[in-house]
Each structure stands twice: as structure tokens, then as C-alpha cells.
């Protein structure tokens, strides 16, 4: 893995070789850039425990400390994830039912009785909107700049997430428009995609829908198939890149699926860097999303003009 240093290569790609002979037209180069959601594009405005305590107080539950909620939430979440992984996909549960169970088991030990259904509803609603979350700096400038990029012939931006379907409503509420991806039905015209020209994200790949979570290669392969569905004609060369903040789920998972990987983290992960160096594994480490565009440009130069 390498810490990123900007480069200054020319963006011009000549159609002629050094002898002035006309070369065959270069293929189309298509960027598929996906992001993790929680922890990469957005984060909670306040701690989960603090927000749970605030909403509980609004529903008449007094005297519950944030520190206690932190303990019971962690236990309830861990138990639910163990008994019903991937939001209960294989158990026949919906993500809403899954989270309702977590909320119930968070508060029951503290109130000595199950909380009212209205509390779970209020929390589910809050954590589906900008009321609970905020974007990281540089998200909107980065996405807008990528959409205006002229180095690649096409740019497709997606999200690959182990979170539930509320990611779409969260991003939309935060001003990051998400297109509604509709798979092609064999024998029928390709459906119109999206909700308008303002959308910045072309699709979201959910672990619940795909049936497995990152770092499993299957979820990255599914994202690639979505890209193929969106670009059914004249595909050319695909350059897949994934950006995330989790070393195992995002960085290692993407590399295992033969994608370019960018790890976003505020602190240098020295042990991970050392392990990758020993294994000959390459990739990029950055401290913020501000650096991602220059890396995408470097990857393009490496692919289009290999040394």
C-alpha cells in the first residue's frame, strides 16, 4: 500500500506513435468508482447512544444514561448480527424488523419492559435522514468533479454497502441524489434509470439484496454486473475502483475482487501497510476524500499510458 502523492502527467492521449504513424483508435475507458457509505460518505451527527437517549426522552423514557445505552446497544447489535446476519436476509426478516429487534433489546434491560412501538418507528425514521447524519467534507465537490471528468469516456459512480436500504434516503436527504437502478428484463427495452440529472450516484449495491456482505467477492462482482447492465453496448475497458474506510471489508475486499482499492483513514495503519508491503499487495492510502480524484487520475494514466 502506498501513501498517495499527486502526479503531473499529461492528460492528452495521442492517436499517433513516435514515428508519426496512425494507430488504431483507442478503446473506450470507463471508470466505475464505488464508495462505502457509512464512515466514508457520511457519519452520525452525534453518537448513536446520544441520539437514542434523546429520542427515548421524547417518548417519555426518563433516566436512561447514554453510557448504559452504549452498552446495551452494542450487546443487542452483536447478538442480532450473530443470530440473523445481513439484516436477517436468510431468516426471512426485513431490515426494519431486524432493527426493531435491536432497539427493543437495547431499551428493555434499561426500562424493565419493552419500549413502545412508536419509539422504534421514530428511531428508524430519524436514522433514515439528515436528522441523524452529516456528509464528510469534500463529498459533494468530489462527486461533482468526477461527474465532469473528461479523462474517462464514461464515469459511473456507485455505492457498495453492508448497511440497509435507508442509505438511499440518507444520501438523497443529504443532497447526494441517487438514481433508482432498474435491472434490464430480457427481451424488453432497457428501462429508464434515475430520478433526474441532479443525481450523483448511479446505483447502490446492498448486501441484503445480493445476499452477502463485504468483503465477499460476490458483492463486488454484483456491482460490476450492474455496470454492465447500465452500459450494455460498446463497453470498452472497465477501470473499477472502490473507496472505503475499512481495511478488511473495503480495501482487502476490493483487491480480492481484482479492483483498484483506496483506503480512507485519518491515521496511517502501520501494521496493515507493513503486511501489504510484505505480500506485494498494492493500493492507495489517503487521509481524506479530497485526495481521491488525483488517485483516479493516476490510475487512468497507468491504464491508458502504461510505462
Image (cartoon, rainbow, N blue to C red):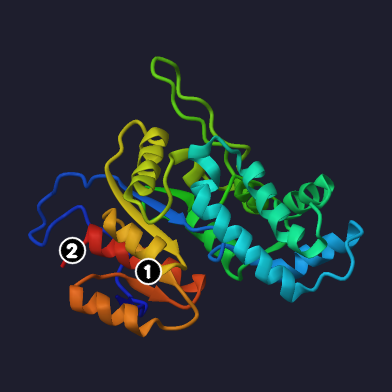
Across the whole image, how many numbered discs are drawn on residues? Answer: 2
Q: Is residue 225 left or right of residue 53?
A: left
Percent across and percent down for residue 61 are 88, 61
Left/right of residue 235 with respect to residue 87 in the rendered view: left
Q: Residue furthest left?
A: 19
Does residue 98 appear left or right of residue 281 in this picture? right
Counting other residues with Cα less than 10 Å from the Cα at mark 2, is it few (<14), some (14-19), or many (20 or more)? few
**Residue farthest along the top direction in this orientation:** 187
Question: Where is residue 106 shown, x and y percent of the image?
Answer: 71, 60
Where disc 2 sits, the SS reads loop
Position of residue 299 in the picture relative to residue 41 (left or right): left
> Residue tagged by mark 1?
295
Q: Quadrant of residue 305?
A: bottom left
Q: Nearer the viewer, residue 211 or 9?
A: 211
Judge whether 94 appears above or below 216 on screen: above
The reply to whether callout 1 and callout 2 are in contact (CB within 8 Å) is no
Q: What residue is pinned by disc 2?
A: 306
Tell me if I can see residue 206 in this picture: no
Secondary structure type for disc 1: helix
Q: CA distance from mark 1 to mark 2?
A: 15 Å
At x 66%, y 71%, the residue is 71
The residue mark sitting in front, 1 or 2, is: 1
Closer-to-camera residue (17/290): 290
Q: Position of residue 286 (x, y in %)?
A: 43, 76
Q: Residue at x 53, y 63 (%)?
A: 142
Residue 189 visible in rendering: yes
At x 33%, y 31%, the residue is 233
Residue 233 badge: none
Give the quadrant of the C terminus: bottom left
Expressed as whole percent of the image width and height from the top left, the position of residue 173 reads 71, 52
Amino acid at each position: 500500500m502506498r501513501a498517495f502523492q499527486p502526479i503531473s502527467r499529461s492528460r492528452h492521449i495521442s492517436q499517433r506513435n513516435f514515428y508519426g504513424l496512425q494507430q488504431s483508435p483507442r478503446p473506450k475507458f470507463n471508470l466505475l468508482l464505488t464508495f462505502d457509505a457509512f464512515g466514508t460518505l457520511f457519519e452520525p451527527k452525534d453518537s448513536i447512544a446520544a441520539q437514542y437517549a434523546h429520542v427515548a426522552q421524547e417518548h417519555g423514557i426518563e433516566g436512561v444514561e447514554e453510557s448504559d445505552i452504549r452498552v446495551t446497544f452494542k450487546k443487542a447489535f452483536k447478538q442480532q448480527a450473530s443470530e440473523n446476519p445481513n439484516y436477517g436476509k436468510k431468516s426471512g426478516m426485513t431490515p426494519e424488523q431486524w432493527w426493531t429487534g435491536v432497539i427493543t433489546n437495547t431499551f428493555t434491560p434499561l426500562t424493565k419492559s419493552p419500549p413502545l412501538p412508536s419509539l422504534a418507528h421514530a428511531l428508524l425514521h430519524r436514522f433514515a435522514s439528515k436528522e441523524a447524519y452529516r456528509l464528510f467534507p469534500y463529498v459533494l465537490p468530489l462527486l461533482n468533479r468526477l461527474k465532469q471528468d473528461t479523462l474517462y469516456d464514461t464515469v459511473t459512480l456507485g455505492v457498495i454497502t453492508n448497511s440497509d436500504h435507508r442509505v438511499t434516503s440518507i444520501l438523497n436527504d443529504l443532497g447526494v441524489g441517487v438514481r433508482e437502478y432498474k435491472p434490464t428484463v430480457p427481451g424488453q427495452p432497457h428501462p429508464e434509470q434515475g430520478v433526474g440529472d441532479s443525481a450523483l450516484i448511479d446505483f447502490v449495491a446492498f448486501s441484503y439484496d445480493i445476499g452477502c456482505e463485504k468483503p465477499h467477492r460476490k458483492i463486488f462482482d454484483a456491482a460490476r454486473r450492474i455496470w454492465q447492465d447500465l452500459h450494455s453496448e460498446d463497453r470498452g475497458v472497465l477501470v473499477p475502483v472502490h473507496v472505503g474506510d475499512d481495511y478488511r471489508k473495503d480495501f482487502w475486499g476490493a483487491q480480492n475482487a481484482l479492483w483498484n482499492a483506496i483506503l480512507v483513514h485519518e491515521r496511517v495503519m502501520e501494521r496493515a501497510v507493513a503486511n501489504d508491503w510484505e505480500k506485494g499487495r498494492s493500493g492507495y492510502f489517503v487521509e481524506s476524500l479530497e485526495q481521491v480524484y488525483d488517485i483516479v487520475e493516476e490510475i487512468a494514466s497507468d491504464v491508458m499510458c502504461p510505462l
